[in-house]
Image (cartoon, helix red, strand yellow):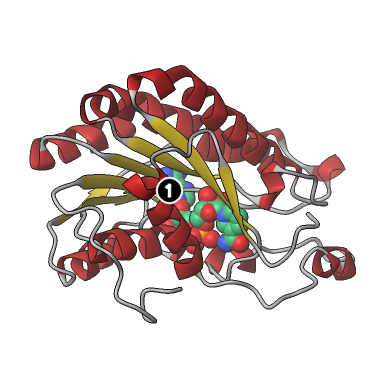
Amino acid sequence: MSETEHTPPRRFVGKSALITGAARGIGAAVAHRLASEGCNVTCTDVNVEGIEATATAARERGVDAIAVPCDVGDEASVKAAFSAHLEHFATLDVLVNMAGVLTATHSHEETLDNWERVLRINLTGMFLTCREALPHLLETKGNIVNAASTSSLSGHPWFAAYGASKGGVLMLSQSLAMEYAKRGVRVNCVAPGGINTDMVKVTMPDDVDFDILTRMMPLGPMGDASMVADTVAFLASDDARYVNGEYIRVDSCTLA
Ligand SMILES: NC(=O)c1ccc[n+]([C@@H]2O[C@H](COP(=O)([O-])OP(=O)(O)OC[C@H]3O[C@@H](n4cnc5c(N)ncnc54)[C@H](O)[C@@H]3O)[C@@H](O)[C@H]2O)c1
């Protein structure tokens, strides 16, 4: 159920979360949802205008919220964002990694620059934020929710760099889950299928066969960002206290 259809529970009162990719799309929806449940939030993204808007919307839900510019692919920028969060909120309970980029091309025409950019933002960026968050999550027995994808689970044509990055996200998350479980920190993933955000307006190569992609979504239409945010909120909450190293698909089918 989306935030608009019912009153959400208040599972995060007194807690704080840092959310990457919070300027728009699923990351913004997660910030809104957690704020509606009483969570103070640090909204980070490279899109400064977007995070200001998301933080304002969070404050309107009655919590404290700050907007901190952060490029997840830049180690110094990630460190600065966590410093800003801790200076303001003192502790960290939840990290939600939603920052990401999607590009489409024929793989034999893929450039090394684009391959490295996608891996840098989607996978290395997530490693950097997890590494920075973990010492603080160990103190609060907090948890991490990462954006995997149905592209983490099987191949999609034209998305090789994206799929490789999202496959890596799943293994990074499950590795951290195994490593930190006994010390009280959980790490899970949400794996969306087609969600109607700006990301899916990606430019496709001219000659692609769209039937291949639409066959992967037989139940269409695409989902809404709030549907993913609802699942992220569950995974980040104590309702999921015995859920670790898991991924939950938020998708209209089971094929891809
Ligand atoms: N929309 C979908 O269908 C879908 C499906 C599966 C997985 N996902 C994943 O969910 C997450 C959110 O996707 P979305 O649909 O909301 O996309 P989106 O494009 O609307 O939002 C992504 C956000 O990431 C930010 N970002 C990009 N590069 C960044 C960087 N270097 N540092 C910090 N922020 C950066 C963008 O500015 C943007 O605000 C992504 O990780 C995406 O891969 C989305």
Taking the spot 34% from the left edge, 19% from the top edge, the residue there is 183
Instruction: Pinpoint residue 192: horizontal percent, then vertical percent.
Output: 60, 57
Q: Is residue 255 left or right of residue 129?
A: right
Q: Is residue 226 left or right of residue 23?
A: right
Of residue 102 and residue 176, the one placed in the foreground of this image is 176
Instruction: Pinpoint residue 202: horizontal percent, then vertical percent.
Output: 65, 63
**Is 33 located above or below residue 85 in the figure?**
below
Instruction: Pinpoint residue 93: horizontal percent, then vertical percent.
Output: 25, 39
**Is 21 located above or below residue 86 in the figure?**
below
Quarter of the image that includes the C terminus: bottom right
**Is 239 located above or below residue 165 in the figure?**
below
Of residue 210 and residue 46, the one placed in the foreground of this image is 210
Instruction: Pinpoint residue 170: horizontal percent, then vertical percent.
Output: 60, 35
User: In terms of image quadrants, where is residue 88?
Assistant: top left
User: In terms of image quadrants, where is residue 52?
Assistant: bottom left
Q: How many marks?
A: 1
Q: Is residue 29 left or right of residue 211?
A: left
Q: Secondary structure at mark 1?
A: helix
Residue 73 seen anywhere in this rendered image of the structure: no
Taking the spot 83% from the left edge, 49% from the top edge, the residue there is 106
User: In terms of image quadrants, where is residue 219?
Assistant: bottom right
Q: Is residue 206 left or right of residue 241?
A: right
Crowding at dot 1, Cα within 10 Å, few <14 / some 14-19 / many 20+, comes out as: many
Question: Which residue position holds label 1?
Answer: 235
Taking the spot 31% from the left edge, 30% from the top edge, the residue there is 133
For badge 1, the amino acid type reads: Leu
Q: Is mark 1 within 8 Å of ligand 1?
A: no
Residue 245 seen anywhere in this rendered image of the structure: yes
